[in-house]
Image (spheres, rainbow, N blue to C red):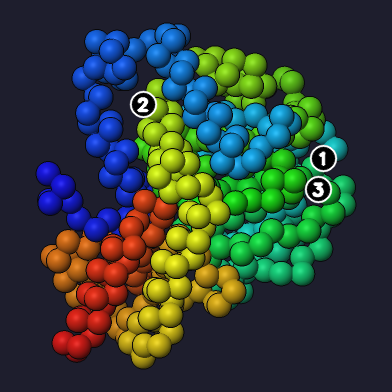
Amino acid sequence: MTEERIFNFNAGPAALPLPVLKEIQASFLNFKGSGMSITEVSHRSPWFDDVINDAVARTKRLLNLDERFHVLFLQGGASLQFAMIPMNFLGEGKSADYVNTGTWSTKAIKEAAILNKAHKVVASSEDKNFSYIPSDISFNADAAYVHITSNNTIKGTQWASFPDTKGVPIVADMSSDIFSRSLPMDKFGMIYAGAQKNMGPSGTCMVIVRDDLLATAEKNLPSMLKYDTFVSKNSMYNTPPCFGVYTIQLVLKWLEEEMGGLDKMQTHNEKKGAMLYDFMDASDFYRATAQKGSRSLMNVTFRLPTEEMEKEFIAAATAKGLGGLKGHRSVGGCRASVYNATTMAAVEALIDFMIAFKKEK
Ligand SMILES: *Cc1c(COP(=O)(O)O)cnc(C)c1O
């Protein structure tokens, strides 16, 4: 079975650690002696309580969260957060700052606009096709929050460090780089991430929200669109995405126990990224599209000399068991997504293939 698995460079849903998939497979029909699959047990059972509590505890340990932070599991993907954030935190008289670094930031801004909530786009990298992360931004001191996308999955850029917002809480969409590095949590009022890039299957969104930001939230909202609802019920106001939470729990266990935590994970990701970028910088054939200093360690976007060659490259790679290298349909080109679960062996195989492909040209 393992022999048939490919090197998976998909952007999302994306590769998960093989030991996690094997553990799911092994316990799928009889979860912890319950005589039921994890997809069959009640979310009100002690079996599931253990799963969700362990997932929360591991998240807190891995990210060094203090007691001000709440870890929640919601549905609706990261995309629902684009609307929930302004609904909850932009009541009468409040305004938020947004930084536009690509497709997902643009979508977040669009939802604030649809809801008619006051917001300012304080910086954007649209002038250069979102190939860099803006710096020297002046934020509004009275903003309710500053929204950023920490890693731009489609454009292949990533905030290498986080801006000084003079105490205004940062709300960050970390869908494609959560748990890839350690974080200066003091800067964040909220972090959210769809699970399917770096944590688990689609259908679950992790939200980490801080008390002081939560205290400013609007009260008069539908229950399912209010963070308070999920905080007060340990994410189980209604049936949570049980299988997603379970997979996340196992991925976090793997991160802690196999990979040795976020500092080690970060070093590993930096090595993988450096291998790919150094190789391309030394090449006159492959060209990384993101500017140095803004390059993503999760989504490596690149071009070949012609679109024709890119097509050929992607097809030949697929035939050799290297999958998911096509760039997002909105930008074209190529993209290797190298999330936490992507091994060094996969990156080496990709570089070997790139060398061989170029030789034949
Ligand atoms: C994939 C992605 C999203 C969308 O996630 P959904 O769970 O499909 O809503 C949002 N933001 C970023 C940065 C992403 O990579």
Picture coordinates of residue 333, whole percent (x, y): 35, 72
Residue 334 placement: quadrant: bottom left
**Residue shown at the point (81%, 48%) measured from the top left:** 168
On the image, numbered disc 3 is attached to which residue?
168
Give whichever of discs 1 and 3 has the lower sequence position.
1
Decide if residue 42 is on the left or right side of residue 358. Answer: right
Labels 2 and 1 touching (C-beta < 8 A):
no
Q: Is residue 169 visible?
A: yes
Picture coordinates of residue 349, whole percent (x, y): 25, 68
Decide if residue 109 is on the left or right side of residue 258. Answer: right
Query: What's the mark number on residue 243?
Result: 2
Picture coordinates of residue 266, whole percent (x, y): 51, 57
Query: What's the mark number on residue 94?
Result: 1
Decide if residue 34 is on the left or right side of residue 145. Answer: left
Residue 132 placement: quadrant: bottom right
Labels 3 and 2 touching (C-beta < 8 A):
no
Q: Is residue 181 visible?
A: no
Amino acid type assigned to the residue bearing label 3 in the image:
Val
Amino acid type assigned to the residue bearing label 2 in the image:
Phe
**Residue shown at the point (59%, 15%) measured from the top left:** 233
Q: Height in image: 280 above or below 77? A: below
Q: Nearer the viewer, residue 98 or 62?
A: 62
Report the number of numbered marks. Answer: 3
Disc 2 and disc 1: Cα gap in Å? 37 Å
